Image (cartoon, rainbow, N blue to C red):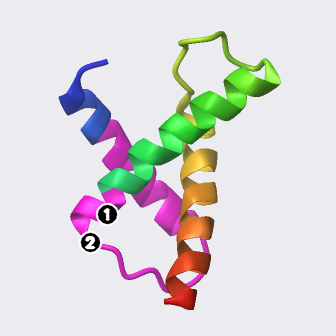
């Protein structure tokens, strides 16, 4: 997957995760893209660990969104403490 497509998919996944997750997240464009990309990576590792994905296989859209929601939840906890 190229960098440009990863950024576009990460942005879309980040927006969907922000729309699904309740609360008031004040994130900018760059943080939304990073959230989506990190969510995809987290979903890929968790899916590989649980046996849902083959090693080296990327996560699907739903897995990426779930991963982004997990990352957004953790970010919300860390941001509240600051």
Is residue 51 a member of the stretch shown in magenta? no
Tell me which secondary structure the magenta stretch mostly adopts. helix
Q: Residue at x 40, y 43 (%)?
A: 37
Q: Residues within 10 Å of mark 1 (few under 14, many from 20)?
A: few
Residue 73: name its quadrant: bottom right
Quarter of the picture holding the N terminus? top left
- CB of mark 2 within 8 Å of CB of mark 1? yes
Q: Secondary structure at mark 2?
A: loop
Is the residue 50 above or below the residue 15 in the image? Answer: above
Q: Which residue is mark 2?
A: 28
In front of the other: 16 or 64: 64
Q: Which residue is mark 1?
A: 31
Residue 47 shown left or right of residue 74 in the figure: right
Is residue 18 a member of the stretch shown in magenta? yes
Is the residue 3 above or below the residue 38 in the image? Answer: above
The image shows residue 27 at horizontal and vertical percentages of: 34, 74
In front of the other: 79 or 73: 79
Range of magenta residues: 8-32
Q: Residue at x 26, y 72 (%)?
A: 28
């Amino acid at each position: 997957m190229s960098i440009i497509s990863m950024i576009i998919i990460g942005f879309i996944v980040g927006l969907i995760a922000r729309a699904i997750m309740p609360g008031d997240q004040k994130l900018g464009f760059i943080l939304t893209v990073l959230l989506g990309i990190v969510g995809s990576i987290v979903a890929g590792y968790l899916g590989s660990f649980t046996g849902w994905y083959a090693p080296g296989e990327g996560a699907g859209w739903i897995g990426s969104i779930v991963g982004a929601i997990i990352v957004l939840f953790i970010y919300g906890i860390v941001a509240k403490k600051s």
